[in-house]
Amino acid sequence: MFTYIDPTVRKRLIEQGKLVRIDSDGQLTPAETAPEPGARAISILGPIPLPLARGEHEYAVDWYASVRHTELSKAQELADDLRERDGQQTFAILADSMAVNSVLLMGDPLTWKNPLVRVHSSCLTGDVFGSERCECGPQLDAALQRIGEDEAGGMVIYMSGHEGRGIGLWAKAATYLLQDAGEDTYQANTTLGLPEDSRDFSDAASILKYFVAGKPFRLLTNNPKKVTDLEAMGVENISREKHVCGVGNANRRYLEAKRDRGHRLDKHDLHLGD
């Protein structure tokens, strides 16, 4: 995080081409100066070689970290204030001002032809703990495997601010208790006074425009709304590919609720028979 904040390190990374800034259309903009007021800009740091081991599979991945310029500005202001007050022990609160998304890239985007892409919403319980209440962990693993085995290459865009379809981990924990009392995953959100789905895919759209650059690509998702949202933000040439995995007794009711809200899942996908 301090590589963003320290001006000397920031300048060096810009000169090396390791820190760039893009606008909402995925076009490069000057990283040395602040964007115009009101302009939405994203800073991207990388590539960073990141060998991954997921279960029995290993992948050679280039990792890029991305963050909105507005969030960087907040972190910079907070860091300056903490330094003035000698608040080193409280620097951890800087993380609260930064939702850092990740791009896990396989292959060379310049040679991509119809690559595979997964826009994956963060899920601590599924991706890290291995919870079977959802299918998120298996979907992440399967996406990496499919992309790694596909000669076209591709990438996973990991959206850090999407926990619980955008409500955050604390509220997500509360929805689990409501689900255990009989509500489905969408009803639990609304019971808390929150939207069924508040995820913002605008950063993902800008990242796609930058890396895919208008080429046709295959999006791994069962959710047609994700395609619609990205297209509404100007992302073109999307074809949807089904991405069903991790179905089990612990999450079948959860997946049925997704199906009822428009996800393309049928009885065969949910192992329900005819």
Image (cartoon, rainbow, N blue to C red):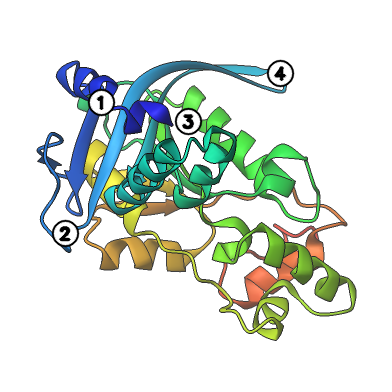
Residue 274 visible in the current orientation? no
- Image coordinates for residue 265, horizontal then vertical, percent: 63, 64
Q: Separation of disc 4 and disc 1 at Cα?
A: 37 Å
Residue depicted at 21% across the width and 17% down the height: 12
Q: Nearer the viewer, mark 4 or mark 2?
A: 2
Task: Name the kind of residue labelled 2 in the image.
Answer: Ala
Residue bearing the label numbered 4: 56
Q: Separation of disc 4 and disc 3 at Cα?
A: 15 Å
Residue bearing the label numbered 1: 10
Q: Nearer the viewer, residue 54 or 194?
A: 194
Disc 3 to disc 2: CB gap under 8 Å: no
Residue depicted at 30% across the width and 44% down the height: 207
Disc 1, SS: helix
What numbered label is drawn on residue 147?
3
Quarter of the figure that contains the N terminus: top left
Disc 4, SS: loop
Q: Separation of disc 4 and disc 2 at Cα?
A: 44 Å
Q: Separation of disc 1 and disc 2 at Cα?
A: 21 Å
Q: Is residue 133 left or right of 94 when viewed as pictured?
A: right
